[in-house]
Amino acid sequence: MTLPSVCCWRSSNFFFAKIGMIIERSIANNIETIWLVLNNIKGSYVFKYSATVSLILSIYEIQGQANTSPYTGLVAETYGIVTGVTDFGFYIQEGVGEWNGIFVYDEDDLYKDISIGDEISVGGVIEEYYGVTEIIISDLVINSSNNTLPASIDLSTGNLGESHE
């Protein structure tokens, strides 16, 4: 892999450098940090770059198969088929079975053109609201419309739990 050249700012001067090597790369709490070595004709410099990143997760991963999501408070992106629409958001599902659905909260009704059967990609902050995992929407793309809904599961109210959100 050939690493690119970059334009940098150091001590009130711009300079161009070639990325020599990536020393370390980590992602924690939606912050990606990269430590790398920059080389130019004047020498080598160690440089730290940090940026907020959005996790790309399945609904199953977001749900975490537990009472609370392991990603609560983090920004994530996921996708699914719209299976229900309410006054304050909508439900999406990815596949069939437990832990494959999630509520997407849209307080400002920004995405009111959503229809049941739309396949969407959605981004936002993962939160727990009265014991229900949800995504507080910040971004949405409609990928396609009029899709077949995932198969339903018959449940009695006594068997309804966290895994059936």
Image (cartoon, rainbow, N blue to C red):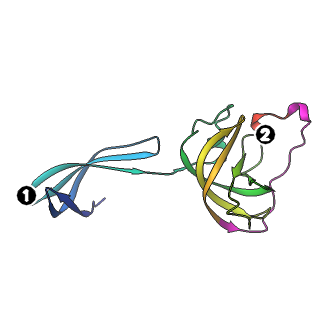
Q: Residue at x 8, y 61 (%)?
A: 41
Q: Is residue 67 left or right of residue 139?
A: right
Give the crowd class for mark 1: few <14, some 14-19, many >=20 residues within 10 Å.
few
* Residue in front for this viewpoint, 94 or 114: 114
Label 1: element kind? loop
Q: Where is residue 10 shown, x and y percent of the image?
A: 16, 56
Give the crowd class for mark 2: few <14, some 14-19, many >=20 residues within 10 Å.
some
Number of labels in the image equals 2
Q: Is residue 35 left or right of residue 43?
A: right
Which residue occupies the extreme left position in the image? 42
Which residue occupies the extreme front position in the image? 108
Q: Quadrant of the N terminus?
A: bottom left
Residue span colored magenta: 142-159
* Residue at which label 2 appears: 164
Q: Residue 88: say if magenta.
A: no
Q: Where is residue 160 shown, x and y percent of the image?
A: 84, 35
Q: Residue at x 72, y 40 (%)?
A: 99
> How far apart, in angstroms, are the residues tagged by discs 1 and 2?
61 Å
Q: Residue 146: say if magenta.
A: yes
Q: Where is residue 63 shown, x and y percent of the image?
A: 66, 40
Residue type at mark 2? His
Q: Residue at x 69, y 63 (%)?
A: 111
Q: Residue at x 77, y 43 (%)?
A: 97
Question: Residue 42 bears which disc, if any?
Answer: 1
Residue 107 appears in which quarter of the rendering?
Answer: bottom right
Q: Where is residue 86 shown, x and y percent of the image?
A: 80, 55
Question: Residue 75 bears which disc, if any?
Answer: none
Q: Quadrant of the C terminus?
A: top right
Label 2: element kind? helix
The mark nearer the N terminus, 1 or 2, is 1
Residue type at mark 1? Lys
